[in-house]
Image (cartoon, grey):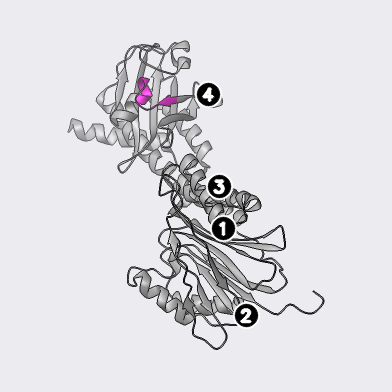
Amino acid sequence: MSRSLDAHDRLQQLETIIGTPAEHLGLPELLAETLRRLRDVMQVDTATVLRYQANGRHLVATAAAGIEEEVHQGVRVPVGSGFAGRVALERAPVILDHVDETTVVNSLLWERGLHSMLGVPMMAGNELVGVLHVGSVTRRQFGESEVATMQLLADRLAMVIQVEALEENRTATMALQRSLLPSSLPEVPGLAFGARYVPGAETGLGGDWYDLFTLPGDRLGVVMGDVSGHGLDAAVIMGRLRSALRAYALDCESPAEVLAKLDRKANHFEHGAMATVAYGIIGPGRDSLTLSLAGHLPPVLALPGEPARLADAPPDPPIGLTIGTPERRTTVIDLPVDGVLVLYTDGLVERRDRPVDVGMQQLAEAVRTGDPERVCAQVMAKMIGNRPAQDDVALLAIRRRTVPAGS
């Protein structure tokens, strides 16, 4: 009976701490209010949430009641160091009855005169979200019931933070994608364009991108790329690769040389990242595309009166996959008047029920000459249809047209 009463009491304490009004607050306000209530219910002097930053393996003070300076000063604790770091490393509750520089990393804790502390990991399933800890300036012993209450609260907050983090990630990724993809296709004499970008229904936004930009000498740079992975991290890497490629394109005449520099940059600064990239240059005559492929799928070329076909362009290693300087090649693809060239990412041609080589052949059958926007619409109808894309899809169609006299 006693254990049942303890469980009932813990649930009552939890409801008192969480409270109905707090549910309607934003995350920062919710955490601050929850920590204030936690202090009152557990009769402690401080309460703090530190969120886990996986990329640096450290904890960052996110919300606090009692020692708000922890948040204001951006307190960081490496995983495995001190009190909170030990909680994160062991993923188990830790109780301290002695607080000084030998037991905690954050000097604010012993400077405030804390004597006793209790910390618990904040877990969402098997994933560490952070650490929740409380402290008292008077000596006290934290019992099993208090540990259990803290753990229940930590797990509840971990789920709230995780949901909020996923939404923040998606919102930031969408904003970044919108800022990096061309807001409108350029007006280029002798060329017409059509494009599509659709996020994957299962994977969400990722690192697919296309780009068109003018170069000195009346040339046009054409890019189609796909960073491995999804979410904000992939989109951020995509943005950095996109900017670097544009910079290299201004200094290098050869697409192969541009991709070689991009590969070197990725291997040095983007350790572990991998991307496939197709980069080509259309010259001032608009009659050909000089193309280099870094692990990317070949474009489809449609000529008037002929079936569309995959361009004969050999792929070289992807960006970021190899160490050293692999040989990178270029291929010249002729663009006759009214010819259409289609570049794409693998989300368009690869599905669980359709191998990539089958999808590429189906894509070639779907491409026809004509207005590029109409070509994109026909391709999406054929390849995607009424089923959502499993992975990101980026699509770019380029048509060569006759330049009016006097242009």
- CB contact under 8 Å: marks 1 and 3: no
Q: Is residue 42 magenta?
A: no
Please state which amino acid type lies under the numbered disc 3: Arg
Q: Which SS class for mark 4?
A: loop
Q: Which SS class for mark 1?
A: helix
How far is the residue under mark 1 from the one under mark 2? 27 Å
How far is the residue under mark 4 from the one under mark 3? 36 Å
Front position among marks 2 and 4: 2
Q: Which SS class for mark 3?
A: helix
Front position among marks 1 and 2: 1
How far is the residue under mark 3 from the one under mark 2? 32 Å
Please state which amino acid type lies under the numbered disc 4: Glu
Residue at label 4?
68
Q: Is residue 81 magenta?
A: yes
Q: Residue at x 50, y 52 (%)?
A: 170
- Mark 4 nearby-residue class (10 Å; few <14, some 14–19, many ≥20): some
Q: Which SS class for mark 2?
A: loop
Front position among marks 4 and 3: 3
- Specify which label sits upstream in the sequence, 1 or 2: 1
The reply to whether residue 74 is in sight is yes
Residue at label 1?
255
Please state which amino acid type lies under the numbered disc 1: Pro
Please state which amino acid type lies under the numbered disc 2: Asp
How far is the residue under mark 2 from the one under mark 4? 61 Å
Q: Quadrant of residue 288?
A: bottom right
- Specify which label sits upstream in the sequence, 1 or 3: 3
Front position among marks 1 and 3: 1
Residue segment shown in magenta: 77-85
Residue at label 2?
371
Image position, residue 278 (x, y; %): 51, 61
Q: Residue at x 58, y 77 (%)?
A: 340
Residue at label 3?
240
